[in-house]
Image (tube, coloured by chain):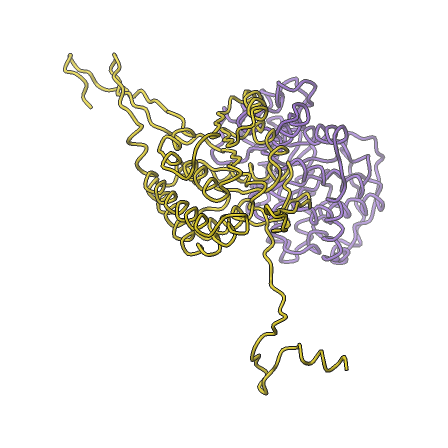
Amino acid sequence: MIGSLLILVKLKTDMPQTKSIFPIPDFTLSPRIDQVGVEERASRFTKRSIKKESKLKGLKLVLNMIDLTTLEGKDTDGKVKQLCYKAMHPHDALAGLPTVAAICVYPTMVKVAKKALEGSGIKVASVATAFPSGQAPKEIKIRDTKYAVANGADEVDMVISRGKFHAGEYNFVFDEIAAIKEACGEARLKVILETGELGTFDKVRRASDIAMYAGADFIKTSTGKIQPAATMPVTLVMLEAIRDFYYKTGRMVGMKPAGGISKSKLALHYLVMVKEVLGEEWLNNHWFRFGASSLANDVLMQMMKEKTGVYQAANYFSVD
Amino acid sequence: MEKQELKKSSLSISENGIEKKTSSKRLEVLKTYKIYIGGQFPRTESGRYYVAKNAEGKQLANVCLSSRKDFRDAVVAARGAFGGWSNRAAFNRGQILYRMAEMLEGRKGQFIEELMHQDSSKAKAEKEVNLAIDRLIYYAGWCDKFQQVFSAVNPVASSHFNFSVPEPTGVVSVIVPQNDSLLGLVSVIAPVIAGGNTCVVLASESKPLCAVTFAEVINSSDMPGAVVNILTGKVAEHAPWFVDHMDVNATIYCEKDSTVQKMMREKSALNVKRVFFYDSINWNTDEGQSPYFIMDTQEIKTTWHPIENIAGSGAGY
């Protein structure tokens, strides 16, 4: 069985790390999660008081961690170009702003985004593998991934096969992630668990373990198409999985909560959680991202409020 | 000995366990006067309160001393409700204002009692409540009529059909009259919401009881949550926030304090919001009701609609 296999995992992160061999555990034995405990612990992170300068620094960090996202059927080249401009110039009235981390689009839009972002240092992330349902044959998913990478995607956001996962076919899920990782080449792989469809924290933990052992560079909560999307408790479960994985293998894995984070205050709570669970090494956009579209404007509004002293209105910020 | 006394004062229970009568020593259940934000009745997030007293110094109630954050939350709620409320059929807005009047009529007794607690005589209190109900009916009627009265088809020298119509300005912050605690409140906010705006209201500081009870009337009259948000607290504290918030489109202030008025004029320049001072209006007379109050918080939109003009045959609309 898979649990007794030893495989060589190639590490393709920017951080200097050595090749390592580690045993693949039996995923049916992933730790069980205490739901009440996790919810209680997650709520504690919202009690920290972050004001004035530290808040401003936190907001800048949040802005710099955003994967500005548009994943709609009605996306056009023009919409993507506009979003790319917003990524490079979040709000020119405020001097000294960082850019966002990446633009997240469908594979067909990667070329447009890549060209629009040329020279800005902003990454292009592409969803792939029959996003958001993941209901497609493996070959098609691999071709989808290769298409995105060939067009210039720096990062690939894949979805796991939730149906197979629920049926207990963990080997299938594992192999699929490993195959996509191979198809990614140099691109970093984010694995979307779609926690809203997994149902329990136990399953979230198990899916996190499978994804990380199969080679994920990031684990991501949701597609944003299913409710509930990212919540603090579910993110905490995944952060703890990352921590345990790091202790066991010495390999860092990134985290991306996505969907439902639209307010600055909540984003700051997430930063607190990352710092207290994983530590400062993860507090940068190489290891932590927010998948969001409306969060950027709220962050900008809060920054303008700190600068001017008056509450802001959405009318004065670009529509994205 | 003590035991016997206790028995006397406790409730008398019949054999089948059903209460026969309540004790004469029953404690009255007093209402907590809370604020009204987004269709809910929260306490202020600040946890602060003040004691409202009448002229004799008798304590009326502990009232929420709202904070800047409460105001911010209320504006966010009001902005969220604006689209839905302004897009409703004008006739439907009229129906809802009428429903508010119905609800107020049904709770007349409670309002008269509260006004009397706040130093009004019975006759004056009755008159004030009646006038408040009539005023709601008055503006309920105007909801789908003021547009026709104030719209215009404009003569232009080109092939365009040119017309102007009033549209609601958005979120309006209101500091209501301090003395006519019910009638003033109703007279100022009715035209604002009749025109399709949403509002955040600061109740009379010294006489806040009716405002909170009026929130209950609004809450039970088919009015969507967050169209009217009512805070209680200090005017001096709230006045600057009411006028410098960038997401507020107009401010109404009903007192004569010239320092506050000057401050409001200055701060309103930030996002060129409209500021109105209803500082010398007698709300007890017909002077206190007019469709022009509705027009204060309306913007005029003018449309140039191209029309055919074939071979000099003249406009075809």
Could you say which is closer to the camera, residue B3 or residue B36? B3
Residue B155 position, x and y percent, is 25, 17
Nearer-the-camera pick, A88 or B306: B306
The image shows residue B37 at horizontal and vertical percentages of 56, 44
Quarter the N terminus of chain B occupies? bottom right
Q: Residue B289: x and y, percent? A: 37, 36
Asked whether residue A320 appears in the rendered view, the answer is no
Return the residue nearer the eye: A53 or B154.
B154
Residue B103 visible, this orientation = yes
Is residue B63 toward the left or the right of residue A73 in the image?
right
> For this view, does A21 lie left or right of residue B90?
right
Q: Residue at x 19, y 16 (%)?
A: B309
Of residues B273 and A295, the one drawn nearer to the viewer in this rendering: B273
Count of numbered badges drawn on the protein: 0
B295 on left or right of B202 = left
Quadrant for the C terminus of chain B in the image: top left
Q: Colour of chain A?
A: purple
Residue A100, percent across and down? Answer: 66, 27
Colour yellow, chain: B
